Amino acid sequence: MKKISLILSVVFFMVLGSLVTPSCDTNQGQIIPYVRVDFYLLLYADLADLGIGSSKVISGEGVNGIILYRESDFGFYAYDRTCTLWPEHDEAVVEDSTFFGVFECPDCGSTYLLMNGAEPNSGPARYPLVEYHASIQGDVLHIYN
């Protein structure tokens, strides 16, 4: 009886150890540093030049800036520009000059398609860009987390 409980204890701790031990591969893209985001943009002043299906880079917000994507008249999405390959990667994605609505990491080459929820389109990244809330209140767009 003592042998069985000893064996079960060993198996339990082995399984627990394999679940808790971090691995470089499984930790990729899961932790982008938290930064408080809470700002407002005027729809008819700050965003007057942002047409449907286009994007705008907002510096000074989020971890490495924010990409604002306008899907429709009143449909906006806000994504952090930090590549999700590694949490410590800390590389800002830039707009791809050859493909509309695609942002690319200059370091690892991962591309993100904005019209698809900023999911990775190619490259080693497996997680989408971090998304912030974007809601309209009157003629003001509120971006926050």
Image (tube, rainbow, N blue to C red):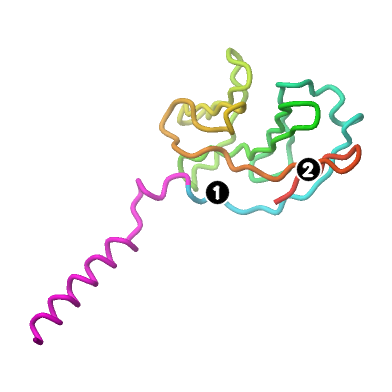
Q: Residue at x 51, y 40 (%)?
A: 84
Q: Which residue is drawn at 87% across and 25% down?
A: 48
Per the model, the C-alpha gap separating discs 1 and 2 is: 22 Å
x and y percentages locating residue 7 in the rendered image: 12, 76
Which of the two marks, 1 or 2, is nearer to us in this view? 2
> Mark 2 belongs to which amino acid?
Ser
Q: Which of marks 1 and 2 is nearer the N terminus?
A: 1
Q: How crowded is mark 2: few (under 14 residues within 10 Å), some or many (20 or more)?
A: some
Q: Name the residue under label 1.
A: 32
Q: Is the magenta stretch mostly helix, strand or loop?
A: helix
Q: Mark 2 points at which residue?
A: 135
Which element carries disc 1, helix, strand or loop? loop
Q: Residue at x 35, y 57 (%)?
A: 22
Q: How crowded is mark 1: few (under 14 residues within 10 Å), some or many (20 or more)?
A: many
Considering every residue shown, the one lying at the far bottom of the view is 2
- 139 magenta-colored: no
17 vs 50, left or right, is: left
x and y percentages locating residue 99 in the rendered image: 58, 15
x and y percentages locating residue 68 in the rendered image: 72, 33
Image position of 8 with respect to 145: above or below? below
68 vs 118, left or right, is: right
- 13 magenta-colored: yes
In this rendered view, identify the residue nearer to me: 22 or 106: 22
Image position of 17 with respect to 119: above or below? below
> Mark 1 belongs to which amino acid?
Ile
Asked if disc 1 and disc 2 are in contact, CB closer than 8 Å, the reply is no
Which element carries disc 2, helix, strand or loop? strand
In this rendered view, identify the residue nearer to me: 123 or 117: 117
Q: Which residue is drawn at 63% across and 22% down?
A: 101
Query: What's the magenta region?
Result: 1-29
47 vs 6, left or right, is: right
Image quadrant occupied by the N terminus: bottom left
